[in-house]
């Protein structure tokens, strides 16, 4: 006969194994921290929001910049609850990239207290809602339900401020990438392949990139008097290197070429753009990192592949509006037709329910 303690031990081990399997199926970073403690009746007002903190760097910047922009409009202090490991990683990255901006915010370790009422705002990833609709709310702590906040309109008057808040450039971290000056014009090209190609989004096309650069050159005749350098950024070094046969990567020394491939980290790429990118071409239009490479660029002279190449499902479900995502002075480009690969300026836009 099986001893009773053996049966109990077997049941305990079985339960423990199930618990272990459940715990292993939950990413460690998503485990919520304990509830934070906050003071009340402070005579101040604060703004917080949900965060899609597990997203990439570009998406993280959108959220932080937008929340700070909305807080500025509402005359509130931006407050970030560090609710789990993803939040901590995101805000640590933001502190390294935008130390000035994060230094002007409040951060509390722990989840949002349940006594704070959640306010519905920004219902979809690419939408824009006027923050003025929140002006009538007098709660000390205003917590928004939205995430992503991928619209330049939330921080429309903050470009110069965001650039000032970027970390101080360290040219030694840029490797051999060219420096923009009175004699050298740097065009920065952002590419994205891996995630986009896998998930059905428009991925960078080398033919479009080369032809778009030809178009850009014809529109800026003043750069013909300068040394023209092109720097490629992205997530696939081999793909980037094959766009131009004479490309040199950023860690190579003593190279003479007009085409470079950055293999530096993303933070340094954005800081490089602030100091050196006179012109930016975004070849995968929905890349949030590409957006910021352009938005924070030295020249603020940005071209992008028209977003209307995205798949039908994106058109129908995203709520994407061209004018909400891309600043109005940015220039959309496209192939002249399906058969003619010459790149021209495009006037197609996506509206609230369809594109035209």
Image: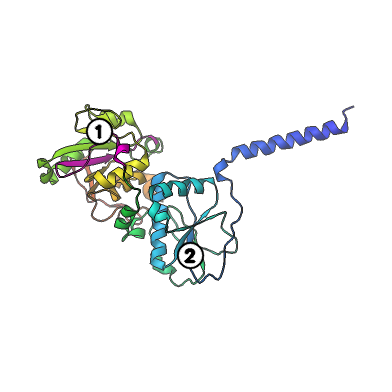
Instruction: Give the residue drawn at x 56%, y 58%.
Output: 112
Q: Report the span colored magenta.
A: 170-194
Callout 2: helix, strand or loop?
Answer: strand
Residue 325: x and y, percent? 33, 53
Q: Position of residue 260 (x, y in %)?
A: 25, 33
Question: Dot 2 corresponds to which residue?
Answer: 46
One can see residue 126 in this view: no
| Residue 95 in the image, given as x and y percentages of width and height | 43, 49
Quarter occupied by residue 159: bottom left
| Rendered residue at 74%/34% (across/down) | 14
Q: CA distance from mark 1 to mark 2?
A: 45 Å
Pointer 2 local density, CA inside 10 Å: few below 14, some 14–19, many at least 20: some
Q: The N terminus is located in which quarter?
A: top right
Which circle's residue, 1 or 2, is located before the other in the chain? 2
Residue drawn at (42%, 44%) of the image? 56
The reply to whether the magenta stretch includes residue 181 is yes
Q: Position of residue 153 (x, y in %)?
A: 34, 59
Badge 1 is on which residue? 260
Asked if one can make out residue 35 in the rendered structure from this viewpoint, the answer is: yes
Q: Nearer the viewer, residue 240 or 342?
A: 240
Which residue is nearer to you in this view: 80 or 168? 168
Left or right: 263 in relation to 334: right
Compare residues 207 and 219 and report the one nearer the observer.
219
Say if the magenta span includes residue 167.
no
Figure colour scheme: rainbow
Find the residue positioned furthest to the right.
1
């Amino acid at each position: 006969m099986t001893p009773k303690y053996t049966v109990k031990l077997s049941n305990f081990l079985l339960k423990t194994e199930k618990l272990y399997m459940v715990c292993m199926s939950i990413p460690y970073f998503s485990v919520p921290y304990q509830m934070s403690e906050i003071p009340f009746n402070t005579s101040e007002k604060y703004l917080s929001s949900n965060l899609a903190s597990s997203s990439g760097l570009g998406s993280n910047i959108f959220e932080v910049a937008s929340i700070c922009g909305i807080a500025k409009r509402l005359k509130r202090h931006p407050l970030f609850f560090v609710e789990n490991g993803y939040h901590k990683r995101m805000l640590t990255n933001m502190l390294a990239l935008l130390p000035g901006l994060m230094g002007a915010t409040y951060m509390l370790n722990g989840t949002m207290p349940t006594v704070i009422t959640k306010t519905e705002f920004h219902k979809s990833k690419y939408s824009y809602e006027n923050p003025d609709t929140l002006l009538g709310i007098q709660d000390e702590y205003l917590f928004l339900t939205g995430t992503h906040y991928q619209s330049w309109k939330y921080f429309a008057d903050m470009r110069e401020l965001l650039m000032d808040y970027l970390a101080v450039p360290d040219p030694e971290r840029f490797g051999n990438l060219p420096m923009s000056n009175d004699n050298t014009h740097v065009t920065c090209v952002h590419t994205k392949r891996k995630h986009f190609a896998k998930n059905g989004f428009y991925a960078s096309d080398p033919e479009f990139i080369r032809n778009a650069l030809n178009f850009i050159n014809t529109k800026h005749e003043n750069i013909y008097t300068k040394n023209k350098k092109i720097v490629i950024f992205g997530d696939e070094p081999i793909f980037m290197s094959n766009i131009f046969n004479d490309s040199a990567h950023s860690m190579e020394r003593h190279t003479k070429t007009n085409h470079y491939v950055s293999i530096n980290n993303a933070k340094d790429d954005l800081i490089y753009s602030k100091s050196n990118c006179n012109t930016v071409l975004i070849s995968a239009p929905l890349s949030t990192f590409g957006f910021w490479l352009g938005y924070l660029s030295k020249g603020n002279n940005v071209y992008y592949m028209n977003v209307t190449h995205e798949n039908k499902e994106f058109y129908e479900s995203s709520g994407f509006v061209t004018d909400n995502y891309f600043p109005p002075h940015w220039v959309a480009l496209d192939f002249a037709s399906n058969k003619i690969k010459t790149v021209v300026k495009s006037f197609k836009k996506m509206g609230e329910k369809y594109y035209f």
